[in-house]
Amino acid sequence: MFNIILFGPPGSGKGTQSERLISKYGLKHLSTGDILRSEIASQTPLGLEAKNFMDKGQLVPDEVVIGMISSALENNPDVNGFLFDGFPRTEAQSEALDELLKLKRTEIGVVLALMVSEEELVKRLLNRGLTSGRSDDNNVEVIRARIVEYHKKTSAVADYYRKFNKVVTIPGEGSVDEIFESLCIEIDKRK
Ligand code: ADP
């Protein structure tokens, strides 16, 4: 099993690159943002709780997302590996993920960190808001709040995995193909 974390701020291209990576490497895509949005669409209690945080650009509580990932791991016993997208987003989530993977006798192979300037992020997210139907992409205040959350809580995830020498930084500006190529080179070196 080879497991990857695709890491980076909101708007750095994780979703776009994830689609390509899962099809090339046959990985199971686990995006906490997608799972949360589908819970909201089905109006589950979990979705309704999460929506309050997401609408403000804040992170959903750790217990909620860790529980979701734990079930997703249990429900997918026979996969080549997982591609984590938008998770972990705090140090506590990173520690929980490592424990869950250890129980499955596997681990994170590499953390691929996409680097994109803040101005470019805001531009991309506002642009995505025109078509995505995501209310958190329509409002500059909410976008800025998400970037603040990223700096306050999520950048610690890269520091956590740096201790284990698992982080590779990839420039996230350029064409989708170029960025995909850089990601594949790093994966092929390690898997
Ligand atoms: P983006 O990375 O573009 O902000 P996501 O779809 O990954 O989009 O996340 C959307 C929102 O869902 C986040 O702003 C946050 O409120 C919530 N969310 C997603 N993943 C997590 C997570 N791992 N921990 C806490 N909240 C999360």
Image (tube, rainbow, N blue to C red):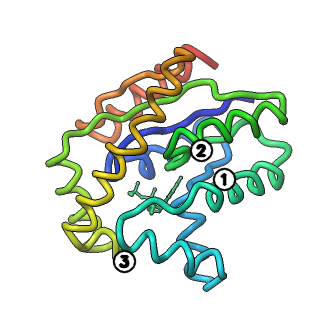
Q: Residue 52: which disc?
A: none
Disc 2 secondary structure class: helix
Displayed quadrant of residue 190: top right
How many marks are shown on the rendered structure? 3
Q: Quadrant of the N terminus?
A: top right
Q: Residue at x 43, y 35 (%)?
A: 156
Counting from the top left corner in percent of width and height, residue 162 is at 48, 20
Return the residue found at the far bottom. Answer: 43
Q: Which residue is disc 3 drawn over?
A: 133
Disc 1 secondary structure class: helix
Q: Which residue is disc 2 drawn over?
A: 93
* Mark pair 1, 3: CA separation: 26 Å
Q: Which residue is disc 1 drawn over?
A: 66
- Which of labels 2 and 3 is toward the front? 2
Q: Residue at x 37, y 24 (%)?
A: 169
Amino acid type for the residue under numbered disc 3: Gly
